[in-house]
Structures are given as C-alpha cells and as structure tokens.
Amino acid sequence: MPTVSVIVPCRNERAHLEAFCASLRAQQLPEGWTMEVLVADGDSDDGSRAWLDANASHYGLQVVDNPRRIVSTGLNRALAASRGEVIVRMDVHTTYAGDYIAQCLAALQTSGADNVGGPWRAQGEGGLSSAIAAAFQSRWLAGGARSRQVEYSGWVDTVYLGCWPRATFERFGGFDETLVRNQDDEHNLRITRGGGRIWQSAAIRSAYRPRDSLAALWRQYQQYGYWKPFVIRKHGGAASWRHWLPGALVLGLAGSALSSLLGAPGWASVLLPGLYLAAVLAASLAIAVRTRWSHLRWLPLVIPTCHLGYGLGFLLGGLDAWRGQRPRARMGRLSR
C-alpha cells in the first residue's frame, strides 16, 4: 500500500496537540493509502513532549528528537525518518479539513507538480486574534500574494505548508538549517529556480491560528523580515517591492523624527507620519467593512505592528547579511 508521511515540527504546543491529533484522525485518505505521522519535538518545556510520549501509540505518532528546536531542523529530522512516497507537512497550530491530505494527493496527481498546497487562510479566536486574521488576509499585509488568495488555484511561487513527492527532496534537497524563518520560501525558490513547478489548489483547505498578542505579532513579523535578506543573499536575487516597502517606511519615519529634532519645518516632520496614519485608518475601515466592525478597535494597531516589525527586521537582516555577519541570536528564538 502506498504511504503518505506527515511531518510535523512542534515546540511548546501542548494546548493544541489534542485538537491537532483529532484533526489527523479525521483525515479521509483515498482508498489504498496508509498514513504515518512523524512529530519532531524541539525540546518542548510546556508538557508537549510528555503528552506526545504518553499518547504516541494511541494516535499512531512517531516522535522524533529535534535538539536544535527550529522548524527547518525538525522538518529534516522527520523527513529522514519517514518512509512514504509522498510527504505532507502539517503544523500543530493549524486546523485541517477532513479531506486535506486527500486533496493534496489529488492535486499532485492532476498537476504533476513538485510541490502542492492550499492557500494560507487565517482564522482567529477572539477579538485581537480575529482582527489579526482579518488583516492577515487583506492586501494591506499580503501585498497581493497569491498564497493568501483563498479562492485562487494555479501555478505559484510558494504555497502554505506543502505536499511533495519524495523525488522532490531527492532532486532539490531538504530545508536550509541555517534559516529560522523563511525556510519554506527558500525551499520553494530552490524548486522553481531548478526547473520545478508549484501548484496551489483552493480545494486544499486549512485554517492557521494567528498570534493573540501584539508583542508576539511584532516578534513574528520582525523575524519574517530579518531572515528574508539571508535568503536573498544565498540565491543572489533582488528583493521585491513587498519586502522593500516596509523597510523604506521605517527609514522614512525615522527620518521624519530626526528632521523634527534638527529643527526642520513642522510640515516636513509630520507629512509622512500623517500620510501613513491616514492610510492605516483607511485600510482599517476597509477591512472592518469587509469582515466585522468589531475589528476596527484593533486594526489601527495590528497593521503598523506588522509593517514596522517586518520593516525593522528586514533592515537589520539586510545589514547583517551585507556585512556577512552571523544572524543575531535573538532572531533565532521562536516567537510563539
């Protein structure tokens, strides 16, 4: 019987493990397929590892050690221990439709792609988390990225999570263990630059749980921004406008503050901050109209947190990558 191997990076996800395992049990595989699940635990200290060890046989899990704790090393360790013809990545902090894996297998068969996946759909749990999810799905944060267009099916540059024939890893290698963030984007870049193809199917449905505090959201986006220049340096490409724009915003706001201290005319120091504030308020209103009015309480805080966190991280990462320095230790700590 053909086997699909589910590889799962995990660190300090005790509160969500039972729901995740229930989601695994609900998966309806195509006839003739069997499934194995490999969870790479990154030295969890919240009771996750004890729960995994106690429930591994009940849920059919194989627990793999990930002493380096980060996602890329966890994925590679689980991948090395797997035996399936098809590899599916799943994260604990995401919920899945009952036909998630079946739709992944169907998309692989019909597209012939080297990697397939569904859109990155966010679903919050409460006031702030729900507002973060609403902003996450909007073009004000996504910048038009197709990976967040929940109705889009077609060829793309990257997808959320992923499903690969084992041959893809044999051809393009595993995940880059020097990257704490953006290891999935880097792997997909390697695939497309190497002549491979990636397909997104709207029928592959999942819901990602976003952060539930502004501080955690700031750390997350700062790390996203910080690690992007290291991917760019590795492959020698140029950053897109979606990556440069938040960094330019941070520089512009810093310049406005400096000009005020240096005695520049008042309009010069408030023009950019004023325009940005107006844009944030307009975006917040547009998102609230499309989603829920209660989001308007949080959106004027959520949007700048993401923009400025990413922008500052991108500038710091660009400086370190340009100087050839080792990544900063605090950017290597996971932000959940």
Image (tube, rainbow, N blue to C red):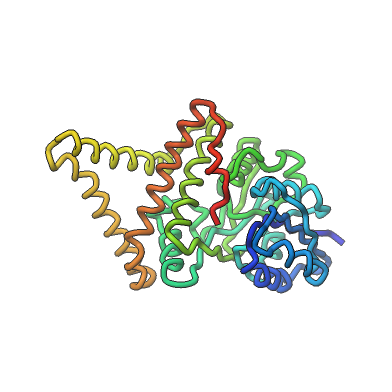
- Tally of marks: 0
Res. 110 visible in picture: no
For image coordinates 71% across by 42% down, the residue present is: 174
> Quadrant location of residue 21?
bottom right
For image coordinates 76% across by 52% down, the residue present is: 65
Q: Position of residue 91 (x, y in %)?
A: 64, 59
Q: Nearer the viewer, residue 45 or 108?
A: 45
Q: Nearer the viewer, residue 107 or 242?
A: 242
Q: Position of residue 213 (x, y in %)?
A: 45, 62
Q: Residue furthest top?
A: 323
- Judged left or right of residue 317, residue 169 is right
Quick one: quadrant of the N terminus?
A: bottom right
Quick one: quadrant of the C terminus?
A: bottom right
Q: Nearer the viewer, residue 307 or 195?
A: 307
- Judged left or right of residue 5, residue 20 is left
Res. 247 visible in picture: yes
Q: Is residue 16 above or below residue 89?
A: below
For image coordinates 63% across by 60% down, the residue present is: 12
Q: Position of residue 115 (x, y in %)?
A: 66, 50
Q: Is residue 70 above or below residue 59?
A: above
Q: Residue furthest right?
A: 1
Q: Position of residue 96 (x, y in %)?
A: 63, 67
For image coordinates 45% across by 40% down, the residue present is: 314
Q: Is residue 243 above or below residue 45?
A: above
